[in-house]
Image (cartoon, rainbow, N blue to C red):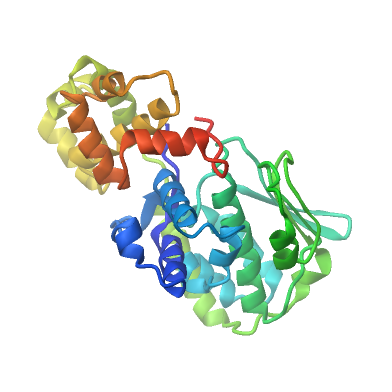
Amino acid sequence: MAQQHIASSYARLLYEFLATRGVDAQALLGPLPAPASGLIPLAQWQVLLQRADSRLGEPAIGLRIAEGIGPQHFGVVGYAGRTCATLADALQRLERYQGLVYDVNPVRVRAEGNLLLLEWGTERGRPGQLVDETGVAALVQLARRICDQALLPSEVHFVNPSPADIGAYLDFFGCPVRFGQPATRLSLPLAYLQLPLQQADPALLELLDEQAEGFLRQRGHSALLHSCQQALARLLPEGRGNIGDLAGQLNRSPRTLQRHLQAEGSSFQQLLDDTRRQLAERYLSDAALPLGEIAARLGFSEQSAFSRAFRHWYGTAPLAWRRHLTRSPHAAPLDR
């Protein structure tokens, strides 16, 4: 039931792009997400992209957004990549640290003949064309920037259906682009691995690697938090979603549970909100579930309370989010 995320620094790219189009991003999307964790839910990113797409109506808008990418948008992963000696070293960092930027489907990197393949499957869901095209294009554009060369992939694959006009994709990537494929894939000439990077700095890279490793440890899955979420998922539909009920399920006192959660950098309220958000995403993907029933399953006293909470989490109403998820041509339903 783990929720999927992107880095909030990556989301900043969209706000900067809208400014170049003369659009007040905060008026359209709300304040730039800046949670203490540095992450925002994938579902929120999907909604932000869809709003920008609806407002501007530009074909292949994800490619245009990606044009402004810089290391700062990938956070420590981007800065570490920039200070590597070669593109091969930078891609090794991407493979190891991708979860700090985007933790949906992990990237698999392998050589095949004279090509290097970077592939993202669909085992943890299909985020949709807007998410996929922005992500792949951002990676290509960032590689071009840190190498200071107009790199051209050999081929690009997307899992989503083909748009009516793929001209913008061919122009951006400079190679064949195929849609409706089993996995999202970026193929690069193997020779690119030896390309030197312009701002290599071994001493700084060592510090950035240490920082990234520290972030990975912090993101390590907590057995306590997992147990709490599983218990809450059972308790909430019964209207038993307070800390006393949860502590009883885990054979602890409320005071002890709160202390253990604080040691994990969490709290009961944060845990409750996170669990409700994750369950709400799952339930809303089932079009047959009425909002009233979803509210009850999440332990809300009435549907209006659920709607207010959902707006607070994602900046949109539950029904609008469901319509986006199930009807948008750019976003396939998530396989949860």
**To which quarter of the image does residue 139 belong?**
bottom right
Q: Nearer the viewer, residue 122 or 178?
A: 178
Whole-percent x and y of residue 120? 65, 46
**To which quarter of the image does residue 60 belong?**
bottom right
Q: Residue at x 82, y 70 (%)?
A: 191
Q: Nearer the viewer, residue 271 or 281?
A: 281
Whole-percent x and y of residue 118? 70, 54
Image position of 109 (left or right of 296): right
Q: Residue at x 62, y 77 (%)?
A: 145
Q: Quadrant of the N terminus?
A: top left
Which residue lies most toward the right here? 113
Q: Is residue 229 visible?
A: yes
Whole-percent x and y of residue 17? 47, 69
Image position of 304 (left or right of 113): left
Whole-percent x and y of residue 186? 72, 56
Image position of 250 (left or right of 278): left
